[in-house]
Amino acid sequence: MRYLALVLMTTFLGPSLARAGDLSGLGNQLLDMQVRAMTPWRQNDGDMQVVVANAPNDKGRDTVPRLLFFGRAPNGMALQYSEEGEIAPVAVFQTNSVGGPLLVIWGSGTGLIVRAYALVNGKIQRVLDDGSFRMPEVIHPNISDDSTVDIVLAEPGWVEVNGTKEKRATAARRYRWNGSQFAKVGTSDWAKRIAR
């Protein structure tokens, strides 16, 4: 069964792994896990590989979603950071081209958990932890500067539409990347969220 998992990983993940460069030793570390998503995280000093997988929890018993960050090491790729995730992964993506934060969105059963991670002083840190009832919006307010990025999260409200109440986005919570964390900029009316 272990060899089948390695063959399937190589078959389905091989093209993305090849684009990410030499990932020697990563396959052996993932043999006992069910990989759900994998993406490169581009950094100025080399790429990392981010994996969402079902794996044993911190006590080594139940299988839970885990978020794993692998980075370059002398003998290939090595685990740099790991934490338990939420119910189900929804999306994992980098907010800008190189060196920027990584956004991870989890389904919680009642909404979305929005978390961002960044390399701060050489260590992976969670730099945003919030929630939303719909997918976040990633906005680059300065088109000529890829490092400036805002995350906009929707706050729900009940709006009357054709005589019935519907849950809609009514307010926007905005966070701006300052190089080490996403700082809250403020809250605005949802319709005015872009005009900042």
Image: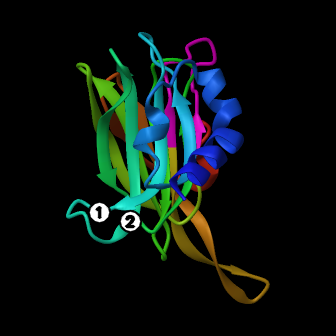
Q: Secondary structure at mark 1?
A: loop
Q: Provide the residue designation for mark 1.
A: 57
Q: Could you tell which of marks 2 and 1 lies nearer the N-terminus? A: 1
In the displayed structure image, the side of residue 81 where residue 114 appears, left or right: right
- Residue 125: quarter of image: top left
Q: What kind of residue is marked 2?
A: Val
Q: Is residue 139 above or below residue 136?
A: above
Residue at 47% in and 54% down: 53
Q: What kind of residue is marked 1?
A: Asn
Most distant residue in the right direction: 162
The image position of residue 176, as x and y in percent, is 42, 33
Regarding residue 66, the answer to whether it shows in the image is yes
Q: Provide the residue designation for mark 2.
A: 64
Q: Is residue 185 above or below residue 149?
A: below
Q: Which residues are magenta?
A: 137-151
Quadrant containing the C terminus is top right
